[in-house]
Image (cartoon, grey):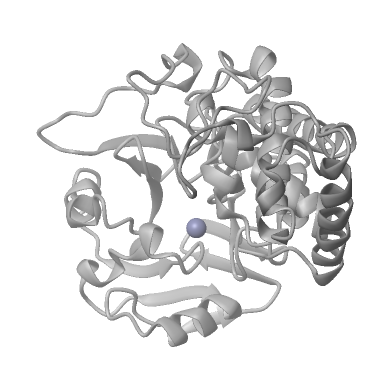
Amino acid sequence: MKHPTRSILSVAVACALLATSALAGSAPAEPNASTSAPAGRAGVPFPDAPEIAPIGVRLDKYLDLPDSAKGPAIDPHKGYRLEKLGRGLYMVTDNAYQSMFMVYEAGVVVVDAPPSYAAKLKQAIAEVTKLPITHIIYSHSHTDHIGGAGLLGGHPIIVAQEETRRLLRRDADPARPLPTVVFKNSYRMHLGSQHLELSYHGDGHEPGNIFIYAPEQKTLMVVDLVFPGWMPFRRFAVAHDLPAWMAQVELIATLPFDKLVAGHVARLGTRADVLTQIEFDNDVKSAAAAALKAVPFVAGINPADAGNPWALTDDYTARVAGHCVKELTPKWSSRLGAFDTFVWDQCYAMEQSLRVD
Ligand SMILES: [Zn+2]
């Protein structure tokens, strides 16, 4: 996570001084000093707080999922679901994670091995072929997507972008064997009559996260960028570089795919899902930008905290995020699955990015 820059800090200190003098005169409405909560405990809610509960508050019931967030059921005895994407190409999913494999004349190429069902991956492949796994492609280094690679056995060729190898060397995790073939910008795999095109478009989700395209099957796999039917995972899937992450989602919309394997959630993605997410991402950006303009830096803070720039910044960003959440709720709360889980995170991530990126 990034921290406010020194300039923000100096603004905070300047505002702290302003606040002290302002509070010495006619104090802003409803200072926290009016509550009796002990220091460090929750005080009264902010005025005009959103109905969607903020981070860290327990909910009795989350919002119901819209039908557009749901996918085909999983057979509980199998624990995974196999979906054919085209000639020799299959998605495997447990309706939370997604990976795929491609069968060619001499073997099988596996793309990602999420630990949540990696122990069943060989069983899933055996449903369609007896051929061995000859290659594994890593979409990126994160263990929740490739941490089951070590369970696949044998001595497959492992292909990844060079940044993924750098990160995996650092992580030194035996569950994620090092890539044996790396590339920088693009890599074409011709295996028998099958083809895969791997390409790298820079750091967005994390360095090394690649696009994997099967041209004949018109299937694109890109992980942790699009969440078909759903709210993105928190903080835009913990985007390493949020502006670049948003640009990569927009790039996906320009590519000639019919089916998107997005790495998460219960169903395949479509072009319409990508366009919906672009609209949502841009709405969060607009709402956070409007909130940063509309919300005063100091309002209602306890005068005793006026010399604490982190307190002022925390209070300010909470009010900015709340303004942003309120703006987004009417349009999106019933349109995306689990809107209430991470909308505060998205607003916090976006206001932070808009202030420092
Ligand atoms: Zn990831």
- At x 70% / y 35%, what residue is drawn? 319
**Is residue 56 visible from the viewing direction of this image?**
yes
- At x 64% / y 62%, what residue is drawn? 240
Left/right placement of residue 328 relative to residue 333 reads right
Q: Of 328 and 78, which appears nearest the observer?
A: 328
Quadrant location, the C terminus: bottom right
**Of all residues shown, which one is farthest toward the front?**
24
Vertically, is 170 above or below 120? below
Quadrant location, the N terminus: bottom right
Q: Position of residue 53 (x, y in %)?
A: 50, 26
Left/right placement of residue 353 relative to residue 257 reads right
- At x 38% / y 65%, what residue is drawn? 143
Left/right placement of residue 9 relative to residue 342 reads right
Q: Position of residue 61 (x, y in %)?
A: 35, 18
Vertically, is 265 above or below 45? below
- At x 39% / y 68%, what residue is drawn? 136
**Of all residues shown, which one is farthest toward the left?**
77
Q: Of 230 and 330, which appears nearest the observer?
A: 330
Q: Of 183 and 28, which appears nearest the observer?
A: 28
**Dividing the picture into quarters, in which one does residue 196 lie?**
bottom right
**Is residue 105 visible from the viewing direction of this image?**
no
Q: Tally the numbered discs.
A: 0
Left/right placement of residue 232 relative to residue 241 reads left
Q: Position of residue 72 (x, y in %)?
A: 34, 22
Q: Position of residue 17 (x, y in %)?
A: 86, 57
